[in-house]
């Protein structure tokens, strides 16, 4: 069996590990546009922060490709697919496959902005190379403007806070981290970030750039030296869509990670599957999802029968020591508790937990995540008890014997 | 593979497992000097309430969601033991979001800590099990 994997992030690595669970002999070729050993993309901000280095950022040890019998082709990008002849075309030639995985991730989305090309120093914040060139451009006097107050923009802000003079963040939304936090939670985190010197212009956007000045819709003018755009990402779907594969925002996949093209799978940021909490078809551009989908694809490519039917948003992130965890969907009734620098909201409906937002004390939050994932009936547990404190107590003796005693369900 | 299993009805709630775990992690020679006056941070924790108690530690899952979710490649499976490379850990706590048992937790310095079946500190039976006076946690092959 000849396997070809396009990509070198967690989805691709998950696929290698998934394939090797059952097939020790098949040939695996891995094409990576980025010329690096597999690294942890989210760690690029920690690299600038000085909390990690390029060695420690490696997502898998140096021997990974060799030990797993992977012919690793760094710096080789896939250009197109010839599904008839089961070949991936690259700049250098072609690679034949029996089973193919597209794990090409996403790329920065840069909305059209007037005068954008007049900005001398502008960066995205997606890759190791982006991070290094941004670092090279910064001086202690740099005034940095970041467009986008999402996860990537704010992680970037944290990463460079010690390397520049000032950071201003502009976002169209009326709150920061609007994809994962509700209004109250966002206000807490925003206040924390302001305390660390970051300024915000929310519900606002850039009307026009003129060299080192950004004129906002509100009329305000912001002088800056370095621009970072972190508005959002776009899935890399063209390999599949050009070959006639069904795509929405991402490459459409079923629970086995199969695309509409024969023997072609997709996983990670480029794939669009079903959110198990809401039932909606969407991209879940998060690391755990990428790995889990990739591993599932790998098992199936090797002839297995794995399903990935519990995809959902699940996220842990921290800024300047303030940690937050979120999961699922924010629908239904709400349990809320607050303390100093503590915030917890649990969302529940139809006898199940739908989602949560917790800031501060994040301990054991995975117990809540599991309840969402397993669709645990709330009527069967002591819900009041678990709202206050995540523990295994509310599940009762029988379920605990399965969890802790090795008793089969 | 041998794992730690809980016999809930035998648990006395004495918390000795917690002390033995903290002692085992400390690498010190005697428990009194190792743990005197410090707040212990064991990898096994006793939950109690309403006359019920039992100890919870990492299950060393066959399908470890913490490893799958780790954004830094800091968690891995070594001979079945779910292992943390504290040096690589970036303190994001994605693993905390992933673990269904609440068995991986932030340590004092921020890197996560979890039960590693004492493979880094001693050979054979993990310290918590070795010191349990009532067989409420055992180290054996079950499934
Ligand atoms: C700054 C930042 C912080 C983040 N923080 C978090 C976080 O805290 N938690 C979290 O869960 N997620 C986070 N994410 C998101 C996370 O990084 C992604 O969800 C994850 O990397 C997706 O994995 P993937 O394997 O699908 O794609 P990627 O990691 O993007 O890998 C895709 C790979 O494919 C290669 N490629 C693309 N096109 C081709 C081609 N044509 N031929 C060959 N190779 C190709 C690329 O070079 C790349 O190496 C963050 C992302 C960024 C940018
Ligand atoms: S930390 Fe949690 S998810 Fe990871 S192996 Fe242990 S019990 Fe399983
Ligand atoms: S806290 Fe550390 S071990 Fe846990 S997911 Fe983050 S990097 Fe991995």
Image (cartoon, coloured by chain):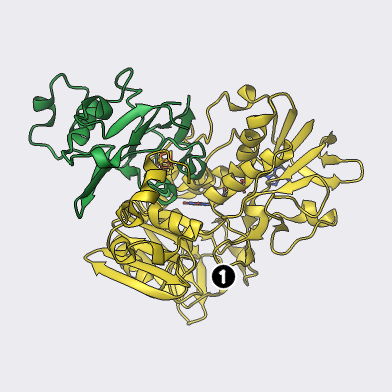
Chain colours: A yellow, B green
B27 with respect to A29 (left or right): left
- The quadrant of the rendered image in which ligand 2 is seen is top left
Q: Nearer the viewer, residue A277 or B10?
A: B10
Q: Quadrant of the N terminus of chain A?
A: top right
Q: Nearer the viewer, residue A195 or A288?
A: A288
Residue A259 locus on image (x, y percent): 76, 53
Residue B83 locus on image (x, y percent): 41, 31
Q: Is residue A273 above or below residue A42?
A: below
Q: Is residue B16 above or below residue A353?
A: above
A258 with respect to A82 (left or right): left
Classify mark 1: helix, strand or loop. Answer: strand
Instruction: Give the total number of marks visible in the rendering.
Output: 1
Q: Residue at x 43, y 41 (%)?
A: A407
Residue A348 locus on image (x, y percent): 43, 70
Query: Is residue A152 at all visible to an observer of this figure?
Result: no
- The residue furthest bottom is A218
Q: Residue at x 74, y 41 (%)?
A: A77
Q: Answer with the quarter of the image where residue A238 lies.
A: bottom right
B22 with respect to A216 (left or right): left
Q: Nearer the viewer, residue A182 or A147?
A: A182
Query: Is residue B132 at all visible to an observer of this figure?
Result: yes
Q: Residue at x 64, y 26 (%)?
A: A68
Q: Chain of mark 1?
A: A
- The residue furthest right is A84
**Badge 1 residue CB within 8 Å of ligand 1:** no
Q: Pointer 1: what residue?
A: A209
Residue A60 locus on image (x, y percent): 53, 32
Within 10 Å of the Cα at label 1, are there few (<14), some (14-19), or many (20+) other Cα atoms? Answer: many
């Amino acid at each position: 069996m000849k396997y070809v994997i396009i990509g070198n992030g967690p989805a691709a690595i998950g696929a290698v590990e998934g394939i090797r669970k059952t097939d020790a002999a098949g040939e695996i070729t891995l094409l990576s546009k980025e010329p690096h050993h597999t690294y942890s993309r989210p760690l690029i901000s920690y690299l600038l922060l000085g909390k990690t280095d390029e060695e420690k950022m490696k997502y898998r040890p140096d021997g990974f490709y060799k030990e797993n019998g992977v012919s690793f082709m760094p710096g080789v990008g896939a250009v197109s697919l010839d599904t008839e002849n089961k070949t991936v075309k690259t700049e250098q030639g072609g690679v034949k496959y029996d089973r193919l995985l597209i794990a090409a991730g996403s790329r920065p989305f840069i909305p059209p902005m007037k005068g954008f090309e007049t900005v001398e120093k502008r960066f995205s914040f997606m890759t190791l190379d982006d991070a290094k060139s941004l670092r090279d451009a910064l001086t202690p006097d740099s005034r940095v403007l970041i467009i986008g107050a999402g996860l990537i923009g704010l992680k970037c802000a944290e990463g460079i806070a010690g390397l520049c003079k000032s950071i201003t963040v502009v976002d169209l939304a009326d709150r920061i981290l609007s994809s994962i936090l509700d209004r109250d939670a966002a206000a807490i985190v925003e206040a924390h970030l302001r305390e660390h010197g970051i300024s915000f212009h929310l519900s606002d956007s850039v009307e026009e750039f003129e060299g080192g000045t950004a004129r906002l819709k509100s009329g305000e003018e912001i002088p800056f030296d370095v621009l970072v755009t972190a508005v959002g990402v776009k899935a890399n779907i063209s390999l599949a869509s050009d070959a006639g594969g069904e795509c929405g925002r991402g490459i459409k996949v079923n629970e086995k990670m199969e695309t509409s093209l024969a023997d072609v799978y997709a996983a990670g940021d480029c794939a669009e599957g079903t959110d198990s909490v809401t039932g909606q078809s969407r991209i879940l551009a998060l690391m755990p999802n990428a790995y889990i989908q990739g591993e599932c694809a790998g098992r199936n490519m090797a002839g297995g029968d794995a399903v990935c039917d519990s995809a959902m948003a699940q996220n842990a992130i921290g800024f300047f020591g303030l940690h937050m965890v979120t999961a699922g969907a924010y629908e239904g009734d709400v349990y809320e508790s607050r303390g100093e620098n503590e915030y917890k909201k649990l969302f529940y409906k139809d006898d199940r937990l739908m989602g949560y937002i917790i800031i501060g004390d994040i301990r054991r939050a995975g117990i809540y995540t599991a309840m969402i994932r397993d669709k645990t009936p709330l009527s069967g547990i002591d819900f009041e008890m678990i709202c206050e404190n995540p523990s295994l107590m509310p599940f009762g003796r029988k379920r605990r014997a399965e969890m802790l005693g090795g008793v089969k369900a | 593979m041998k794992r730690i299993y809980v016999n809930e009805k035998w648990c006395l709630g004495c918390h000795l497992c917690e002390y033995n775990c903290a002692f085992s992690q400390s690498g010190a020679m005697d428990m009194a000097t190792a743990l005197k006056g410090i707040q212990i941070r064991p990898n096994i924790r006793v939950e109690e309430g309403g006359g019920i108690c039992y100890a919870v530690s990492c299950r060393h899952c066959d399908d470890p969601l913490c490893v799958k979710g780790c954004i830094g490649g800091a968690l891995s499976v070594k001979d079945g033991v779910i292992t943390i490379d504290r040096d690589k850990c970036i303190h994001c706590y994605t693993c905390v979001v992933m673990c269904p048992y609440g068995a991986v937790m932030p340590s004092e310095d921020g890197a996560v800590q979890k039960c590693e079946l004492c493979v880094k500190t001693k050979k054979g039976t993990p310290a918590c099990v070795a010191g349990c006076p009532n067989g409420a946690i055992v180290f054996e092959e079950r499934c």
